[in-house]
Amino acid sequence: MKVNLSLQKMSQSVDLTNIDLNFVDTERMDQNSLDKTPRLMGVVKSSHQDVLADIYQNNISMAVWQRQLGRLSQYAESLLVSAPNFVFKSQGNSTQLNATLTKLLPDAQNKALFVEDVTLLVDMFACLFDLKEVGLRLNVLSTAMCPRFHVDKIPCRLVSTYAGSGSEWLHEAHVIRDLLGLGGHVADHNSGLHEKGRINQLKAGDVALMKGDEWPTSLGRGVVHRSPSASLENKRLFLSLDMI
């Protein structure tokens, strides 16, 4: 798995007006205190796909391309009905994955458009991280895959929801990392959330790159997130892409 840091040239600057920064009251801190405070990571959002390259900025933990699905949502919603147990997990290049999805996905209006969109995301992810192959997972979900807040032990992952509720995530300033996962001791889905913290949520259509704990400069501070609730009545169509 290679993270091509030379691609940082693709995004030399970040528009600070689009960065959703963690709360830190710097006006009430003296310089000595600031020097001892770990720099908190921000989240950058934009309606332009170029925002994904900002994941190479050291002060960014997540980059979100905010987009409207349009006709893609029609096929996604139909898939929830026609293939309520659809599970696809594979790896390959965009051409291979396109052919496999075209064969496996049920026929319906806008199917070709949907497959082309998934292929586009595979191409973008592979280009951004200089990958020959990408790991792809596309699932219809009626339960939460990962209901507890956690961090992925990987460099970076792309996630997007085509139908249903989007992934939930926390700002670094809203996290108590010692209480994540098994550190929470009890099966509390909110373990790790600061008592004054806020749960954020991606929207259907959003394409997010989330740094994990193995990103070279994240220093064990990958994005804390979880799957939203889902049920037989409220399914999700979820896509994730991983480095191979």
Image: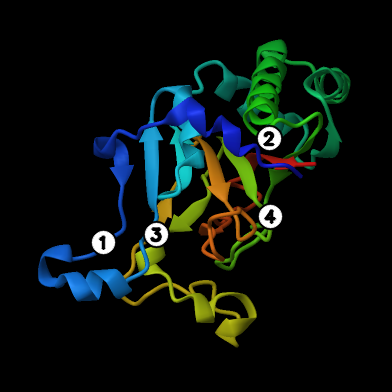
**Placement of 94 over or under 171, stated as above or below:** above
In the image, 153: left or right of 52? right
For disc 4, the marked residue is: 154
Camera-near label (2 vs 4) is 4
The N terminus lies in which quarter of the figure? top right
Label 4 SS: loop
The C terminus lies in which quarter of the figure? top right
Task: Say what amino acid the circle numbered 2 marks.
Answer: Leu
For disc 1, the marked residue is: 23
In the image, 74: left or right of 122? left
Residue 143: % across, % down: 67, 56
Residue 87: % across, % down: 81, 41
Res 10 seen here: yes
Picture residue at 36% right of the left edge, 60% below the top: 40
**Placement of 237 over or under 92, stated as above or below:** below
Quadrant assignment, res 162: top right
Question: Are discs 1 and 2 less than 8 Å apart at CB?
Answer: no
Front position in the image: 96 or 75: 96
For disc 2, the marked residue is: 80
Quadrant assignment, res 183: bottom right
Question: Are discs 1 and 3 less than 8 Å apart at CB?
Answer: yes
Label 2 SS: helix
Camera-near label (2 vs 3) is 3
Q: Give the colouring mode of the picture.
A: rainbow
For disc 3, the marked residue is: 171
**Label 3, label 4: how far apart the Cα atoms are:** 18 Å
Picture residue at 58% right of the left edge, 56% below the top: 227
Res 205 seen here: no
Nearer-N-terminus badge (1/3): 1
**Label 2, label 3: how far apart the Cα atoms are:** 31 Å
